[in-house]
């Protein structure tokens, strides 16, 4: 069996849904489990509903109407007969959201979040499953909230692998097609949970692991994995083959091609992951799996935005020692701060962190009780994996560098954003290296 994943961008309108059918048709007889995200920007809109509902404000009603209208126009294009069952199924989902929002919010924000936001995937899969069935691609709609079992860590739920594996194996028959929601699951009390934003890739990987799939294919609006984000870097090239290990490293440094948790389960069972273009389904894309680390062997460029640098000095010019670092990391850990780069000198340390507007002020306040603290906001972190002198020089040009770190394979700088506005130019000649 194969597992295909279609993200929100690929099913943002009726044309996108028709294209899913086209892609599936090309793959003919293979039984496929199709994992689908919420359509377009539905998840963001549902997040706004949660925020208003949680503050017990009005405003959610209009947002909900807008989401409903958007879905309705997709359905009108796909299902000309208004008595089609799918209209009732979708109407029922919107009634459920309205019912929740007419009650009192749970005191835990994240519980409300999962309850409401999870409906985005329910609606999209209802529409897509029905459309595919109408077109003769016979499939069963299955409910991830009954199959992907997690703990109750709402918004960032962790998978209960044994339970999930059993349920998926019992449900998914080897010769049938299925449509299932990405991103969502449920806890022991059957309360909806979510796996973290952009978590549908991860769902595809969980399903593939459980049913021992032959491969996973993630369909995207890019030709595959490129050696840099084309919106940020010029002259990027398609990577044809990349090892699991290398892909995990890239995700760690902030490459946004695949959700970071996606690789590990696949690696454990040696299931290849393909990233392909839903616009050119015949082209080969990128294969992540066993084999060479990277082909073609190119430097990989990654930019991570929304960073900040915390500089911490001891008050009495005492050395920064293990005890101080342990206190600092304790604060980071407690408040959930992700450190992306760190540097020590005798009496000070610098940390480049994900700059969360809510969390960072709390962190700074706690640190200021113990140390002298400075903060540089508006920083971007640039990484070149498999850098060359040439690429390093080109990337650094014109930037106000706040931190720099070099290891044999990886070169990173944290630079202030005013200097990083123009996109770094990569001359094509600098792209090939031997390693
Ligand atoms: N719909 C969810 C999100 O937008 C999950 C996903 O797209 O993978 O984050
Ligand atoms: Mg999405």
Image (cartoon, grey):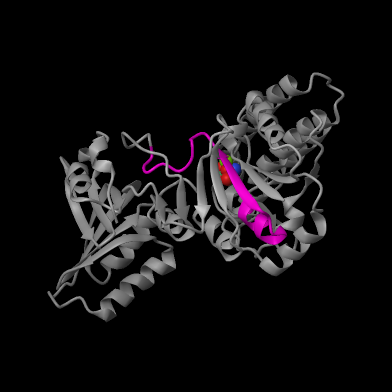
Give the side of residue 316 with respect to residue 238, left or right: left
Give the side of residue 258 with respect to residue 168, left or right: left
> What residue is at 70 percent from the left and 61 percent from the top?
210
Give the side of residue 263 with respect to residue 39, left or right: left
Question: Does the magenta run of residues contain 221?
Answer: yes
Quarter of the C terminus within the rendering: bottom left
* Residue sitting nearer the eye, 286 or 187: 286
> What residue is at 22 percent from the left and 39 percent from the top?
418
Most extreme residue toward the left is 317
- Over which residues does the magenta segment extend? 203-229
* Residue sitting nearer the eye, 173 or 58: 173
Can you give x and y, in whole percent of width and height, for residue 83 in the image? Answer: 87, 24
* Residue sitting nearer the eye, 104 or 10: 10
Numbered marks: total: 0
Can you give x and y, in whole percent of width and height, for residue 356 in the image? Answer: 39, 52
Residue 205 seen from this side: yes
Can you give x and y, in whole percent of width and height, for residue 39 in the image? Answer: 62, 34
Question: Does the magenta run of residues contain 181?
Answer: no
> What residue is at 69 percent from the left and 24 percent from the top?
74
> What residue is at 39 percent from the left and 60 percent from the top?
338
Q: Is residue 130 above or below residue 385?
A: above
Give the side of residue 186 with respect to residue 318, left or right: right
Can you give x and y, in whole percent of width and height, for residue 43 in the image? Answer: 59, 40
Ligand 2, by image quadrant, is top right
Residue 425 seen from this side: no
């Amino acid at each position: 069996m194969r597992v295909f994943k279609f993200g929100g961008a690929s099913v943002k309108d009726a044309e996108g849904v028709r294209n899913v059918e086209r892609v599936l048709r090309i793959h003919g007889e293979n039984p496929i489990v199709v994992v689908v995200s919420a359509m377009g920007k539905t998840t963001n809109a549902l997040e706004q509903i949660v925020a208003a509902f949680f503050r017990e404000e009005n405003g959610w009603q209009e947002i909900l109407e807008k989401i409903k209208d958007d879905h309705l126009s997709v359905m009108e294009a796909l299902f000309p007969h208004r008595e089609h069952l799918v209209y009732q199924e979708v109407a029922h989902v919107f009634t459920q959201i309205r019912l929740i929002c007419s009650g009192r919010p749970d005191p835990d924000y994240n519980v409300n979040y999962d309850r409401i936001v999870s409906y985005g995937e329910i609606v999209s899969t209802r529409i897509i499953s029905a459309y595919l069935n109408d077109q003769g691609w016979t499939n069963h709609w299955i409910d991830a909230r009954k199959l992907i079992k997690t703990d109750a860590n709402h918004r960032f739920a962790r998978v209960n692998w044994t339970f999930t594996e059993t349920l998926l194996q019992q449900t998914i028959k080897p010769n049938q097609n299925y449509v299932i929601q990405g991103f969502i699951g449920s806890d022991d009390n059957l309360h909806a949970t979510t796996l973290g934003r952009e978590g549908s890739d991860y769902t595809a990987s969980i399903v593939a692991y459980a049913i021992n799939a032959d491969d996973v294919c993630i369909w995207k609006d890019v030709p595959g994995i490129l050696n840099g984000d084309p919106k940020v870097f010029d002259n990027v090239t398609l990577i044809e083959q990349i090892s699991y290990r290398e892909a995990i490293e890239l995700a760690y440094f902030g490459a946004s091609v695949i959700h970071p948790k996606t690789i590990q389960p696949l690696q454990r069972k040696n299931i290849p992951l393909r990233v392909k273009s839903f616009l050119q389904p015949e082209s080969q894309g990128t294969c992540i799996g066993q084999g060479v680390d990277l082909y073609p062997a190119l430097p990989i460029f990654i930019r991570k935005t929304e960073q900040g640098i915390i500089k911490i000095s001891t008050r009495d010019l005492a050395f920064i020692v293990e005890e101080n670092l342990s206190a600092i990391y304790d604060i980071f850990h407690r408040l959930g701060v992700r450190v992306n780069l760190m540097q020590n000198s005798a009496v000070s340390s610098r940390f480049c962190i994900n700059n969360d507007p809510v969390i960072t002020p709390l962190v700074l306040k706690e640190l200021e009780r113990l140390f002298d603290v400075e903060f540089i906001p508006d920083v971007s972190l640039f990484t070149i994996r498999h850098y060359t002198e040439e690429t390093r020089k080109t990337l650094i040009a014109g930037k106000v560098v706040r931190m720099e770190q070099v290891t044999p394979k990886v070169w990173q700088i944290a630079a202030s954003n005013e200097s990083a506005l123009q996109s770094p130019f990569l001359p094509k000649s600098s792209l090939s290296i031997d390693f």
